Image: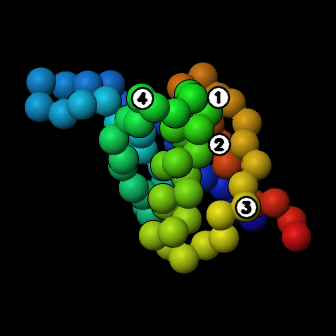
């Protein structure tokens, strides 16, 4: 079963805050932090972006971690 890990990347001198999503297998995407969304929705947005990049389904369940969320696919 595939899992998607997300984590917050704080702002630097040259970049705004971001969220990174990866699948533990070197597939990843980093998106800008969307301050218009709730915290969990920002992390889900990154996970869905990775799903779309990899052509995976976007029906996800999540659980919190110390610095983000982990997403897994719902069984259909």
Residue topped by disc 2: 70
Mark closest to the chain's N terminus, 4 or 3: 4
Measure how far apart labels 1 and 2 are at the Cα level. Answer: 7 Å
Residue topped by disc 1: 65
Mark closest to the chain's N terminus, 2 or 4: 4
**Labels 1 & 2 near each other (Cβ < 8 A):** yes
Query: Image point 39% across, 55% down: which residue?
Result: 29
> Looking at the image, what colour scheme do you see?
rainbow
Q: Secondary structure at mark 2?
A: strand
**Labels 4 & 3 near each other (Cβ < 8 A):** no
Residue 49 placement (x, y as % from top left):
48, 59
Residue topped by disc 4: 35
Mark closest to the chain's N terminus, 1 or 3: 3
Residue nearest the viewer, comparing 59 with 54: 59
Residue topped by disc 3: 59
Query: Image point 76% across, 49% down: which residue?
Result: 61
Mark closest to the chain's N terminus, 1 or 2: 1
Q: Secondary structure at mark 3?
A: loop
- Crowding at label 3, few (<14), some or many (≥20) Cα neighbours within 10 Å? few
Residue 18 placement (x, y as % from top left):
35, 36
Q: Can you tell which of label 4 and label 3 is closer to the viewer?
A: 4
């Amino acid at each position: 079963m595939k899992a998607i890990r997300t984590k917050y990347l704080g702002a630097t001198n040259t970049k705004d805050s971001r969220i990174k999503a990866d699948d533990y297998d070197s597939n990843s995407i980093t998106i800008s932090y969307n301050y218009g969304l709730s915290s969990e929705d920002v992390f889900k947005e990154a996970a869905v972006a990775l799903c779309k990049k990899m052509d995976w389904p976007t029906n996800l369940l999540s659980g919190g971690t110390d610095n983000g969320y982990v997403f897994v696919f719902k069984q259909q």
